[in-house]
Image (cartoon, rainbow, N blue to C red):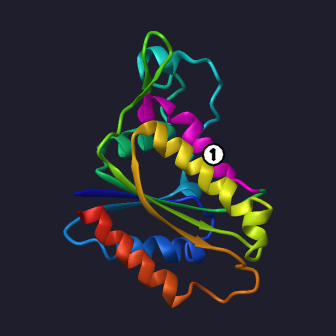
Amino acid sequence: MRVLVINGSPRKKGNVATMLHAVSDTINDADVHWIDVNDLSIRPCMGCMKCRETGICVLPEDDGHRMAKEIKECDALVIGTPVYWGNISGQMKLMFDRIVPAMMGESKLGIPIALHKGKKAVIVTACTTIWPFSWIARQTSNANHAMKEILGYSGFKIVGKLVLPGTKKKNGVTQKIINKAKRLALKLNK
């Protein structure tokens, strides 16, 4: 099984990365590929919509094309982002904007076609806003919704999510979340 881990945080040893590792390091007999989105060089989408006809982005070759290939080749996805202004990180958004043709197709009538049916995913988020305000103010829930939307239209089945609110006042990831991460890893193997 090929597992793609995408860290949407600029912090390679931060809370999001810790939770992503807690999932990916627990997966047995997997070929794990780790990508830090901040290390990628991706041009912004121009909105030309050519990719909807051809299935390939028309921009010159960059890491957006590489990520499209990585997504196509994975069997499972573990994806994480910090919550910025109630949404996924800008780097993560930029990447997903560019790899639309790798995530979903489109019928001649404009109906979305999921390209990743049967693949599983885990969503990870971390937010400085404390509980319950992280949900009341829709900080964490908006970021989770954005990733569910992207993955759902692409056909991924989300087997679970890890949410860490109030990171400003916390010192790392709790053992409770690490344990949940390990349980989610087992769901990716099934």
**Which three-letter amino acid code belongs to the residue tagged 1?**
Lys
> Seen from this angle, which residue lies furthest left?
29
Q: Which residue is mark 1?
A: 93
Q: Nearer the viewer, residue 36 or 145?
A: 145
Residue 89 in magenta?
A: yes
- Considering only vertical position in the picture, is 106 above or below 167? above
The image position of residue 162, as x and y in percent, is 52, 70
The picture places residue 115, in percent across and down from the top left corner, at 36, 33
Query: Split into 4 quadrants, where in the image is the C terminus?
Result: bottom left
Please say whether residue 50 is one of the residues in the magenta stretch.
Answer: no
Q: Is residue 135 above or below residue 105?
A: below
Q: Is residue 82 above or below residue 120?
A: below
Q: Is residue 69 above or below residue 109?
A: below
Q: Measuring 35% from the left and 39% from the top, which residue is drawn there?
A: 116
Which region shows up in magenta? 86-104
The spot of residue 86 in percent (x, y) is 74, 56
Q: Residue at x 39, y 46 (%)?
A: 156
